[in-house]
Amino acid sequence: AQSVSQHNHHVILSEAASLELGCNYSYGGTVNLFWYVQYPGQHLQLLLKYFSGDPLVKGIKGFEAEFIKSKFSFNLRKPSVQWSDTAEYFCAVSSLSGTYNYIFGTGTRLKVLA
Amino acid sequence: SQTIHQWPATLVQPVGSPLSLECTVEGTSNPNLYWYRQAAGRGLQLLFYSVGIGQISSEVPQNLSASRPQDRQFILSSKKLLLSDSGFYLCAWGTGGFETQYFGPGTRLLVL
């Protein structure tokens, strides 16, 4: 069965530190990849997505993610975090063949210290 | 622009009571609709999805059911709530099964 793993459940960083959140999935076929973010008190919303093309995708607020097909990974990065990046981040994968598959990871809670 | 509404925002119900959570979408036609349950440390668990009126697919066996009486209305129900039904319920819509999903504000349910 398809699955998504986020290895970091809680991350605490100081402002200006670099961020990398890991996401790995298990599925051998074609996938769409997503990062969603939930800021405190706000709706879960899309941060960035990869469907095809350049494996390095850029999202809102300076976030980017790189799709490495050989590693089944889609890690999220930001070179310098801000206090306002404090949120919960979810990786998600949808597959384009067979039955419906849209799987979310367990989430990573990021706390940025001012 | 599209918006998605959920109500109520919070709900406290006794064990054994019925449940009805409502989700409506504005600004789009024939959306795919989804119900998720979000639990701390467990991410989002897909409960039901619907690709059209009256078409419901269940992802996990449980005490809950879903209905889609109108194109942009999605209802999550239970005849008798269990303690384990407590959680944060999210409704979402999308234009296709594998595309971006857009989430509502959620309903926090506490079953006592």
Image (cartoon, helix red, strand yellow):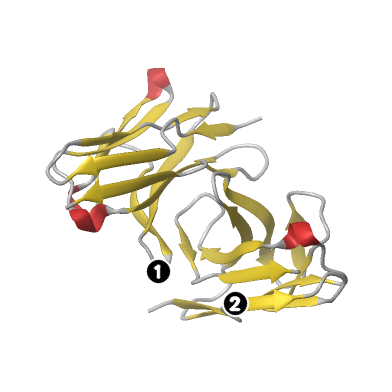
Where is mark 2, residue-wise? B10
> Mark 1 falls within which chain?
A
> Mark 2 falls within which chain?
B
Q: Position of residue B33 (x, y in %)?
A: 61, 65
Whether residue A113 is situated above or below residue A68 in the rendered picture: below
Query: What residue is drawn where x is 54% and y is 23%?
Result: A28
For the residue pair A96 and B40, the one nearer the viewer reads as B40
- Quadrant of residue A69 within the rendered picture: top left
Say the numbered circle drawn on residue A41: 1
Query: What residue is drawn where x is 46% and y is 64%?
Result: B102
How far apart marks 1 and 2 lie (CA) works out to 13 Å
**Res B72 seen here:** no
Q: Position of residue B20 (x, y in %)?
A: 74, 78
Whether residue B102 is situated above or below residue B9 in the rendered picture: above
Q: Is residue B103 left or right of residue A100?
A: left
- Quadrant of residue B110 within the rendered picture: bottom right
Query: What residue is drawn where x is 15% and y is 46%?
Result: A15
Whether residue A71 is situated above or below residue B68 in the rendered picture: above
